[in-house]
Amino acid sequence: MAQISIIADDKMVIKDGVFADELKLTDMPADVWAVQFDTTTSKGHVEKRDLSIEEITSIGIYQSCIDEYDTAVAAEVAAGAPNLKQDFIDDRNALLVDTDWTQLPDSPLTDSKKTEWATYRQALRDLPTSTTDYANVKWPTQPS
């Protein structure tokens, strides 16, 4: 069973946290911005460009996007190519999770240290927009 996200403008499908981007998504309706679907509960929603949300109980017309994703992921696996971008996202997400404690109200850090950690965490969140070479990521420096 899977959690599925389809993001039209990013030409991306994410299935259980693993993504494929640069997809064509040719069957995606023009008025749809994103689709979120949980195959476990058979429930999801379609986020439309006019900001309306439509509840769905089947993946329906969006199955072709999932098929395109499955084909792209299978091709990467068959080629034995490492998914450096996915590894980068996984590493970044792990760093964010590992530093969540710094922003909690009961954290032992001073306000100034919390601010340093908040700045560091924001730099981590900004990395995907500024990173293109996933083999040589310029990671921000953790506060001491």
Image (cartoon, helix red, strand yellow):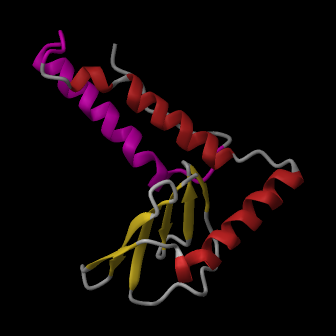
Q: Is residue 24 magenta?
A: no
Q: Percent position (x, y) of residue 12?
A: 55, 67
Of all residues, the one furthest to the top in this rendering is 108
Q: Is residue 110 magenta?
A: yes
Left or right: where 62 falls relative to 81:
left
Of all residues, the one furthest to the right in this rendering is 79
Secondary structure mainly formed by the magenta segment:
helix
Q: Percent position (x, y) of residue 101?
A: 28, 20
Residue shown at 69% from the left, 71% from the top: 67
- Residue nearest the observer in this picture, 56 or 84: 56
Residue shown at 45% from the left, 46% from the top: 127
Of all residues, the one furthest to the bottom in this rendering is 30
Residue shown at 55% from the left, 83% from the top: 61
- Residue nearest the observer in this picture, 28 or 113: 28
- Residue nearest the observer in this picture, 3 or 1: 1
Q: Percent position (x, y) of residue 10?
A: 50, 70
Residue 141 in the image: above or below residue 36: above
Quarter of the figure with residue 140: top left
* Residues drawn in magenta: 106-134
- Residue nearest the observer in this picture, 70 or 56: 56
Left or right: where 15 falls relative to 77:
left
Residue 32 in the image: above or below residue 66: below
Residue 27 in the image: above or below residue 53: below
Q: Percent position (x, y) of residue 25?
A: 60, 80
Q: Quadrant of the C terminus?
A: top left
Quarter of the figure with residue 74: bottom right
| Tag count | 0
Residue shown at 17% from the left, 9% from the top: 108
